[in-house]
Image: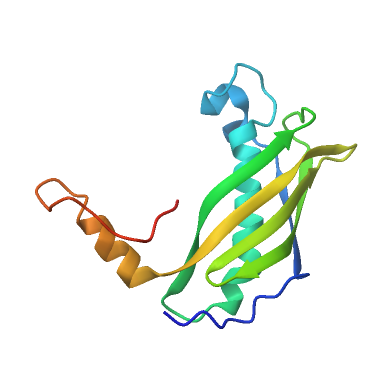
Amino acid sequence: METDYPIEVGMKGEQTFLVEERFTAGHVGSGSLRVLATPSMIGFMERTATGLIQPRLPPGISSVGVHVDVRHLAATPVGVEVRVACEVTGVEGRRVDFKVEAWDEVELIGQGAHQRYVIDVERFLKRLENKLPGAGTGAGSESGS
């Protein structure tokens, strides 16, 4: 698979999300409070990273998240906007590394690192077919979420 895509160290992206009930700890099951859940914050970070690099990938090529190392530093209530920023910090072959941060309207609420791999969608989906019941063992080389 070709890996010469215009993804470069230093590229930056940003997105804003509204904390809705569906993103709360009580709703996703990661706690009982009506505050932004850590899994939701991480999802916002992954969406921002994906949104940064996907437009630079040709049709049939995408990326999958493979690693997240994030600290959730402060709670954010329902109805507050969260701004997520990401920056490409490394590109090696198909691997893309990101610095990620999340801010609510008051303070830094999360920070860390995220890693994605560029994949051929058809090849990736073919590998998944092998995991279906009765399809075989599913051995392959591309992984991720």
Q: Position of residue 29 (x, y in %)?
A: 52, 23
Taking 145 as reference, is 91 left or right? right
Q: Is residue 17 above or below residue 35?
A: below
Query: Residue 30 lies in what quarter of the image?
Result: top right
Q: Is residue 111 above or below residue 51?
A: above
Query: Residue 50 lies in what quarter of the image?
Result: bottom right
Quadrant location of the N terminus in the rendered image: bottom left
Q: Nearer the viewer, residue 136 or 52?
A: 136
Q: How many marks?
A: 0
Q: Residue at x 75, y 35 (%)?
A: 79
Q: Position of residue 105 (x, y in %)?
A: 87, 40
Q: Outermost residue, left direction?
A: 134
Taking 121 as reference, is 97 left or right? right
Q: Position of residue 122 (x, y in %)?
A: 32, 71
Q: Outermost residue, top direction?
A: 32
Q: Nearer the viewer, residue 35 or 116?
A: 116
Q: Is residue 59 above or below residue 105?
A: below
Q: Position of residue 70 (x, y in %)?
A: 68, 40
Q: Residue at x 29, y 59 (%)?
A: 140
Q: Residue at x 82, y 40 (%)?
A: 104
Q: Outermost residue, front direction?
A: 92
State the scheme by which the image is colored.
Answer: rainbow
Query: Residue 96 lies in what quarter of the image?
Result: bottom right
Q: Residue at x 38, y 61 (%)?
A: 142
